[in-house]
Image: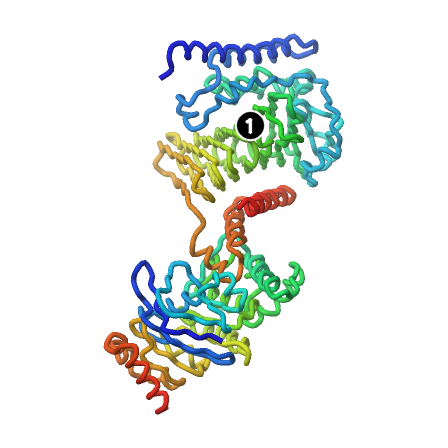
C-alpha cells in the first residue's frame, strides 16, 4: 500500500528525515517510535503533505502512485488520514458541518453518493458511538474549547467518518488519561480491517498495549535505527531511549539497514 | 500644492453643488402643507450649517481616511417628491423582506414613505410606527417628535447630519409607550429605485422607547437597480429607563452607491441597547455610531460585520461614552476584505470621571483575503475613572496556515477550505443575530461572495 524509499525531508532548510525506508501493506499496524526530535512527527506530516516540509530526496509510492506529487487534499480523498498531534481549533465552523463537507468531498471523488445534512446526521450519530462522543459535540465549533482528550477523540471520530485506507496517528495517546486512552484505542481497533493500514506514531509503549502493532520501527536522528515486532516496544520501554539515542548518528544508513535485516532474521 | 487658480475653481465648484442642494432645500421649504414652523426652522438652521462647512475633507481628523469628494462632485439630486410612488410592486421588494416582520414593515422608496408597500397589522395598538413626514404634521405625535428629534444628532461639525436635517421629511417615527413589549421586529426598508437618475435621499429615523418597553428594529438599505445614488441617513434612538432596543442595520446598497449614516443612542437607567451593523454594499460607506450612557446601570452591545470586495470602501467611527457609573459596553466589529478594498475602523471608548464600575470591551478584527486590501484600525480607550474594567484590541490577519492545512488534510479543496474558514470568521458576529432571515441572508451573502471569488480565480 505504501512504499517509502530513502526519504529525506527538511523544514526551513534544516534536514529532519535523513533517509527513511519503510513498506506498509494493507491489514498491517505499524508503530513508529523514537525519542523527541527523532523525526516521527515530521514523517507523519510529510505523508499528509504539510506545506512547510520539503522533501529533498527519495520517493513515496501509495498504491503504486507517486504520493509526493499529490496535493494534500487529494491524498485525503484517496484515503490517507493524519490524526494530528495537536488538533487545530477552527472557530465558527461546526464539527458536523465540517465533517459532512469532508465526507462529501471524498464521496464525490469516488463517485459515491453524497449525503444531505439529515442523512449525514444519522451516519455521524452511529460513528460517534465508536469513540463514545456525545452528540452535543457535533454542533460545536471544530475542537474549540475541547479538552485535550476530547480533541483526540474528535480526531478518531473524523477517521471513523472518512474511513481511510491508511491512517497515521501522530501521538494520539499523548495527554490522554487511562480512560480516554482506552476509548481512543478501542475506537481505532474497531476501525481496523484487513483492508486498511494503521501507522501509530508514539513516544511511549503504553498505547501499544491497547493497539497491538505487527511491526515496530524506532527512529533516531531522522533514521530508522531498529526494527522488529511488538517485542521491540517492550524492550524500549525497559531500556529507555538512551539505548538507541546515538544509533542514528553513529551508523550510516547502508550499514544500519543491513544490520536491521540481520536482526529481523534473528527475531 | 494647488495653484490659486485651482483653489478658486474648487471653491466655486463646491459652491455650485451646495447651490443645487440649496434650490432643492428651498423647494422643500416652500412645499404647501402643514409642516410646523419649528421643523422649517430646524431645516433652515441645518442648511445654514451645511452651507457654512461644506462637505468634509481628508484634512479633518475624523475624515482622514475617507475621501467624500466624489459625493461632492457627483451632483446628486435630492429626492423630495413626497407623492412619488414610482410604481414599484410587492414582487419587486420581495427579496428584501424579512419574514419575521411581514406585517410590521415600513417601506421607503428613495427615502419617501410608501404606504401601499408597507404593512403594519401585527403591531400592538399602543405602538406608533409611522411616516416621520406625517408625524411632523399631526399634533398628537408632533409633541413627542418635537421633544426628541434632532436632540442628539447635532448638526455642527457633522455636515452629513446637517444635510440630512436640512431635508428633514421622510423617514420613520417609532414610539413604544411605557411597558409595551413588541414581539415582532419592525422593519424599516429603505429602497432605492435609482437607475440612471442620481438621487440623494435623506432617511431620518426617530425611535423612542418609553420606560420598560421592549422592541426590535431592523433598518435595511437595498436597491432595485445598480444605480449611482447617495443615501444620507440619520437615526436617533432614545431608550428610557429599563427599556430594551435591539437594532439591526443591514446596508446592502448598490455597488455604485454612496452611503453615509449616523446612529445615536441615548440610554436611560438600566436600559439596554443591542446593535448589529451589517455592511455589504455601497462603493463608499461611512457609519458613525454613538452610544451615550446618560444614566447608571445600562448596557450595550455594538457589533458589526463588514464584507468588502474589490473597489469598496467602508468606514466605521464609533463612540461609546460611559458618562455615569456601572454601565457595561461590548463592541465587536469584524471585517472581511477582498480584492482592492479598504476598511477604516475608529472606535473611541470614553470612561468619564466618576464613571466607576464601568465594564468596557472593544474588539476589531480584520481578515485580509487579498494583498491589495487595506485596513486602518484605531481602537481608542480614554479612561478618567479608576475602578473600571476595560480592554480593547485590534487585529489584522490572514487565514491561518495551520487551520487551512487541517481542513485540506481532511480532503477539502483549498478554495472550499478557505471559504469555510472565512465563513467561520464571520460566524462570531452572525451567530449572535436573533432573526433567522437576517442570518440566512448573511449566510447567503457570505457564501455567494466567496463563490464569486471562487469563479473569478
Rendered position, B93 above or below B171: below
Residue at (62% x, 27% y) in the render: B227
In the drawing, does residue B213 fall left or right of residue A210? right
Q: Quadrant of residue B129?
A: top right
- Residue at numbered disc 1: B259
Given residues B263 and A98, the one toward you in this image is A98
Q: Is residue B60 left or right of residue A248?
A: right
The chain ID associated with circle 1 is: B
Q: Nearer the viewer, residue B287 or B218?
A: B287
Which quadrant holds residue B4? top left
Give the residue at x 45% y 78%.
Answer: A24
Assign the N terminus of chain B to one quadrant of the image.
top left
Residue A82, percent from left and from top: 46, 67
In the rendered image, residue B200, in percent from the top left (x then y), is placed at 60, 21
Q: Quadrant of residue A236?
A: bottom left
Q: Position of residue B315 (x, y in %)?
A: 48, 31
Amino acid at each position: 500500500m505504501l512504499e517509502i524509499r530513502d526519504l529525506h525531508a527538511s523544514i526551513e532548510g534544516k534536514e529532519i528525515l535523513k533517509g527513511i525506508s519503510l513498506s506498509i501493506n494493507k491489514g498491517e499496524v505499524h508503530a513508529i517510535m523514537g525519542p523527541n526530535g527523532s523525526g516521527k512527527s515530521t514523517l507523519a506530516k510529510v505523508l499528509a503533505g504539510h506545506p512547510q516540509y520539503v522533501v529533498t530526496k527519495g520517493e513515496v509510492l501509495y498504491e503504486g502512485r507517486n504520493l509526493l506529487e499529490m496535493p494534500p487534499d487529494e491524498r485525503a480523498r484517496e484515503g490517507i488520514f493524519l490524526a494530528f498531534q495537536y488538533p487545530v481549533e477552527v472557530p465558527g465552523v461546526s464539527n458536523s458541518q465540517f465533517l459532512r463537507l469532508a465526507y462529501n468531498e471524498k464521496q464525490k471523488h469516488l463517485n459515491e453518493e453524497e449525503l444531505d445534512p439529515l442523512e449525514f446526521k444519522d451516519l455521524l450519530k452511529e460513528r460517534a458511538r465508536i469513540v463514545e462522543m456525545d452528540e452535543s459535540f457535533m454542533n460545536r465549533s471544530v475542537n474549540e474549547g475541547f479538552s485535550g482528550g476530547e480533541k483526540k477523540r474528535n480526531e478518531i471520530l473524523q477517521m471513523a467518518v472518512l474511513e481511510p485506507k491508511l491512517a497515521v496517528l501522530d501521538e494520539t495517546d499523548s495527554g490522554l488519561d487511562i480512560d480516554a486512552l482506552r476509548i481512543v484505542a478501542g475506537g481505532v481497533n474497531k476501525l481496523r480491517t484487513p483492508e486498511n493500514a494503521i501507522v501509530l506514531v508514539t513516544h511511549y509503549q503504553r498505547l501499544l498495549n491497547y493497539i497491538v502493532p505487527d511491526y515496530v520501527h524506532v527512529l533516531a536522528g531522522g533514521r530508522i535505527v531498529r526494527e522488529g515486532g511488538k517485542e521491540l516496544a517492550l524492550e524500549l520501554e525497559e531500556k529507555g531511549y538512551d539505548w538507541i539515542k546515538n544509533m542514528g548518528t553513529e551508523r550510516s544508513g547502508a550499514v544500519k539497514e543491513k544490520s536491521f535485516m540481520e536482526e529481523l532474521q534473528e527475531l | 500644492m494647488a495653484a490659486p487658480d485651482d483653489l478658486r475653481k474648487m471653491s466655486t465648484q463646491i459652491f455650485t453643488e451646495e447651490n443645487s442642494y440649496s434650490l432643492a432645500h428651498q423647494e422643500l421649504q416652500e412645499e404647501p402643507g402643514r409642516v410646523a414652523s419649528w421643523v422649517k426652522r430646524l431645516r433652515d438652521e441645518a442648511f445654514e450649517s451645511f452651507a457654512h462647512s461644506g462637505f468634509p475633507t481628508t484634512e479633518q481628523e475624523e475624515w482622514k481616511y475617507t475621501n467624500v469628494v466624489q459625493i461632492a462632485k457627483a451632483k446628486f439630486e435630492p429626492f423630495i417628491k413626497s407623492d412619488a410612488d414610482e410604481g414599484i410592486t410587492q414582487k419587486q421588494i420581495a427579496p428584501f423582506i424579512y419574514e419575521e416582520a411581514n406585517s410590521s414593515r415600513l417601506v421607503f422608496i428613495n427615502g419617501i414613505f410608501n404606504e401601499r408597500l408597507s404593512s403594519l397589522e401585527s403591531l400592538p395598538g399602543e405602538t406608533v410606527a409611522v411616516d416621520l413626514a406625517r408625524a411632523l404634521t399631526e399634533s398628537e405625535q408632533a409633541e413627542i417628535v418635537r421633544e426628541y428629534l434632532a436632540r442628539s444628532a447635532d448638526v455642527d461639525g457633522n455636515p452629513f447630519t446637517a444635510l440630512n436635517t436640512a431635508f428633514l421629511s421622510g423617514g420613520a417615527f417609532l414610539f413604544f409607550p411605557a411597558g409595551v413589549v413588541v414581539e415582532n421586529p419592525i422593519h424599516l426598508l429603505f429602497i432605492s429605485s435609482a437607475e440612471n437618475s442620481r438621487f440623494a435621499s435623506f432617511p431620518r429615523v426617530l425611535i423612542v422607547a418609553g420606560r420598560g418597553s421592549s422592541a426590535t428594529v431592523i433598518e435595511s438599505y437595498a436597491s432595485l437597480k445598480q444605480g449611482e445614488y447617495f443615501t444620507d441617513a440619520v437615526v436617533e434612538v432614545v431608550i428610557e429607563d429599563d427599556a430594551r432596543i435591539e437594532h439591526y442595520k443591514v446596508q446592502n446598497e448598490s455597488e455604485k452607491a454612496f452611503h453615509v449614516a449616523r446612529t445615536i443612542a441615548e440610554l436611560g437607567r438600566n436600559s439596554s441597547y443591542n446593535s448589529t451593523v451589517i455592511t455589504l454594499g455601497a462603493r463608499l460607506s461611512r457609519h458613525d455610531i454613538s452610544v451615550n450612557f446618560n444614566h447608571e446601570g445600562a448596557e450595550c452591545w455594538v457589533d458589526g460585520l463588514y464584507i468588502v470586495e474589490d473597489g469598496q470602501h467602508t468606514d466605521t467611527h464609533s463612540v461609546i461614552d460611559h458618562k455615569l457609573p456601572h454601565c457595561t459596553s461590548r463592541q465587536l466589529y469584524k471585517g472581511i476584505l477582498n480584492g482592492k478594498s479598504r476598511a477604516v475602523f475608529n472606535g473611541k471608548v470614553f470612561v468619564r470621571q466618576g464613571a466607576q464600575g464601568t465594564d468596557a470591551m472593544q474588539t476589531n478584527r480584520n481578515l485580509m483575503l487579498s494583498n491589495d486590501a487595506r485596513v486602518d484600525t484605531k481602537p481608542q480607550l480614554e479612561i478618567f475613572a479608576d475602578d473600571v474594567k476595560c480592554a480593547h484590541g485590534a487585529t489584522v490577519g490572514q487565514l491561518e496556515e495551520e487551520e487551512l492545512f487541517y481542513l485540506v488534510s481532511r480532503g477539502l479543496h483549498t478554495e472550499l477550505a478557505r471559504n469555510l474558514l472565512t465563513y467561520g470568521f464571520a460566524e462570531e458576529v452572525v451567530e449572535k443575530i436573533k432573526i433567522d432571515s437576517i442570518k440566512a441572508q448573511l449566510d447567503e451573502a457570505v457564501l455567494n461572495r466567496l463563490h464569486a471569488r471562487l469563479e473569478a480565480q
